[in-house]
Image (tube, rainbow, N blue to C red):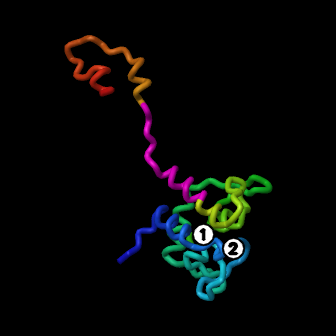
Amino acid sequence: METNYTVDYFEGKFKSIPSKMWRSTGWGSIDRKEPTCATGHCGFDNGRYYKATKENIALIKIFESLNVHDKDDGTPIVDDSHRFSWKVVRINDGQVKEYRQSTPKKRVLAALRDIKKMQEPKHIDITKELAVLPIQETSDVIATKETILS
């Protein structure tokens, strides 16, 4: 059965990983039960020639839409690889001005919450606009302000 890698999937996965198993800067190894970064928790292994898993590639794709900037000089962080994400790594490591939470886990989860908000449909409250629209009194009116608002 193929896993559906969504924001909710990664949010659940990362929430369940104990904080002591997260690290910033450098890669640990989940194979050796060492603390590692978000990409490492998704199977990325720098020591194996930048081996990426389907899970890791899905994480990269989810973070693509996020606009983040270097915490020091403000330059945009851009990913140029389908197997590795500087956005994920630099958010994890606290090198992004938009995510200044105290731990790698908190930073990555905050970014995922922002991505989730971006994916939500935009609901526009049109009741204010309808309240000021003039309703023409003609025989072809099929709805009135009252029936639209009810």
Magenta span main SS: helix
Instruction: Tell me the amino acid under the disc marked 1.
Output: Ser
Out of 125 and 84, give the one closest to the viewer: 125
How far is the residue under mark 2 from the one under mark 1? 23 Å
What residue did someone put label 1 on?
81
On whether residue 124 falls in the magenta region, the answer is: yes
The reply to whether residue 48 is in sight is yes
The reply to whether residue 76 is in sight is no
Q: Quadrant of the N terminus?
A: bottom left
Question: Residue 78: where, in percent of width, then height?
Answer: 65, 60
On whether residue 46 falls in the magenta region, the answer is: no
Q: Is residue 17 above or below residue 34?
A: above
Left or right of 78 in this view: 11: left
Q: Quadrant of the C terminus?
A: top left
Q: At 63% from the left edge and 66% from the top edge, which residue is drawn? A: 105
Residue sitting farthest toward the left: 139
Q: Mark 1 falls on what kind of element?
A: loop
The residue mark sitting in front, 2 or 1, is 2
Q: Earlier in the sequence, mark 2 or mark 1?
A: 2
Instruction: Tell me the amino acid under the disc marked 2.
Output: Arg
Residue sitting farthest toward the bottom: 32
Left or right of 97 in this view: 64: left
Q: Mark 2 falls on what kind of element?
A: loop
Bin the neighbour count of mark 2 within 10 Å (Cα to Cα): few under 14, some 14-19, many 20 and up.
many
Residue 20 sits in which quadrant?
bottom right
Numbered mark located on residue 23 in the image? 2
Out of 13 and 1, give the one closest to the viewer: 13
